[in-house]
Amino acid sequence: MVEAVAVDLASTLREAVTGSVRFNEPLDTLSRWRIGGRAAAIVEPSSATEAAAVLRVMAERPEPIVVIGETSNMLFDSRGFDGVLMRVGPRMSEWSIEGRRVHAEAGASIPELVRATAEAGLSGIIHAAGVPGTLGGLVLMNGGTQRKGIGEQVVRTLIANERGELHAVRHDDLGFAYRTSNLQGQTAAILEVELELVPGEPAALIVDIDAILAERAAKFPFDLPNCGSTFLSNPAMYSIVGAPGRAIEEAGLKSVRRGGAQISEKHANFIVNLGGATDNDVLWLIALVRTTVQARTGFTMDCEVRHLSPDGRMRPAHEVADERWPDLRSSEG
Ligand SMILES: Cc1cc2nc3c(=O)[nH]c(=O)nc-3n(C[C@H](O)[C@H](O)[C@H](O)COP(=O)(O)OP(=O)(O)OC[C@H]3O[C@@H](n4cnc5c(N)ncnc54)[C@H](O)[C@@H]3O)c2cc1C
């Protein structure tokens, strides 16, 4: 946890943005999972130009910078983050629709965008109904449902690289694959996104959205803080063992608790925060699930959720779980 932030970092960030700059901020109240220590600083740019300026000034500084959206796919470390979180969120959330094209800032809310495009008679991202978060986060993760990903609809994006240089990057250069893009593992910020959708009938699209939302509400534990599906579905495993939730349930791990974290009673691929959970609690459950399912089925499940270390390393959470509990793997695997 960071107790004090250098005065020069404060003035550097305040010069770069007109939006909000806050220091020594708690992450448990910000994060979807309600887990995390404190971040040295959180900055919310109001435009692509401001976001690029933040990256430019941070390229000259020792503190790490990490871009976040709504944190619906992130696990913060309970020790905190000794750097700057740049939130591309509500202050960068405008969009416009022209014909079949949607031009959106990356902080646009996915649930709002899905509904607005349906009302405008456009189909193509209806599969993302019920997925929380921002457009930028969804593009980075190539998220969606029904094995579809938003990447199919992305025509181009506006990106600032780690030096704060703005570039338009076209679909073919974004490296979309199942639940990933080649922007993962970079400091780059997705700032704007252009989507190409297909015509549909608004009333029918709204009916589809409402049906998806009702189905998800019945299946998923929305009453407790969580980060959606913890483990990725692996096609080879799916065809033999089934979805991760089923494999975890059949391993007898549903409802297992560690500290304040629990493998959900409602859906075993969700880990919920019953109150006061730490990242260690969640990561231990992840290590337990991986070890047990691997021993039973021969398949190793990887995480979709990403963990942020105090030093700024952002990695799939299973990599951190394996690092913290290597013995759990070797003794039970
Ligand atoms: C209840 C629940 C259900 C979910 N269901 C689904 C589902 O069905 N399908 C699915 O695919 N996902 C699902 N998710 C996961 C999550 O909603 C998506 O991955 C979402 O798109 C993440 O967006 P975010 O803004 O919250 O990103 P964050 O969680 O803030 O960030 C995720 C990653 O994206 C990076 N990032 C975020 N914004 C930017 C940006 N502008 N530029 C560069 N990098 C950025 C972060 O650094 C991080 O690596 C679910 C999550 C929850 C909590």
Image: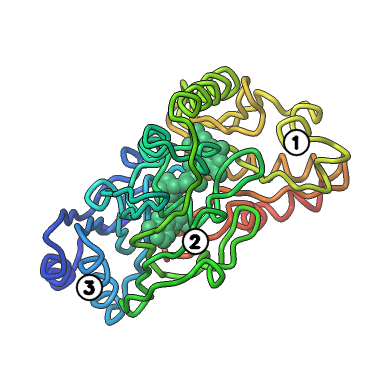
What is the three-letter code of the residue carrying label 3? Ala
Image height of 163 relative to 77, above or below: below
Q: In this rendering, which labeled residue sits more in front, label 3 or label 2?
A: 3
What is the three-letter code of the residue carrying label 2? Met
Q: x%, y% of residue 238?
A: 80, 41
Q: x%, y% of residue 44?
A: 23, 55
- Cβ of disc 2 within 8 Å of ligand 1? yes
What is the three-letter code of the residue carrying label 1? Ala
To which residue does mark 1 refer? Answer: 243
Q: Residue at x 34, y 55 (%)?
A: 103
To which residue does mark 3 refer? Answer: 53
In the picture provided, is 317 more to the left or to the right than 249? left
To which residue does mark 2 refer? Answer: 314
Task: Tell me the distance, in whole angstroms, between the alpha carbons under discs 3 and 2.
Answer: 22 Å
Say whether residue 71 is visible. no
In the picture provided, is 101 more to the left or to the right than 55? right
- Name the foreground residue: 79 vs 152: 152
Coloring scheme used: rainbow
In the picture provided, is 220 more to the left or to the right than 225? right
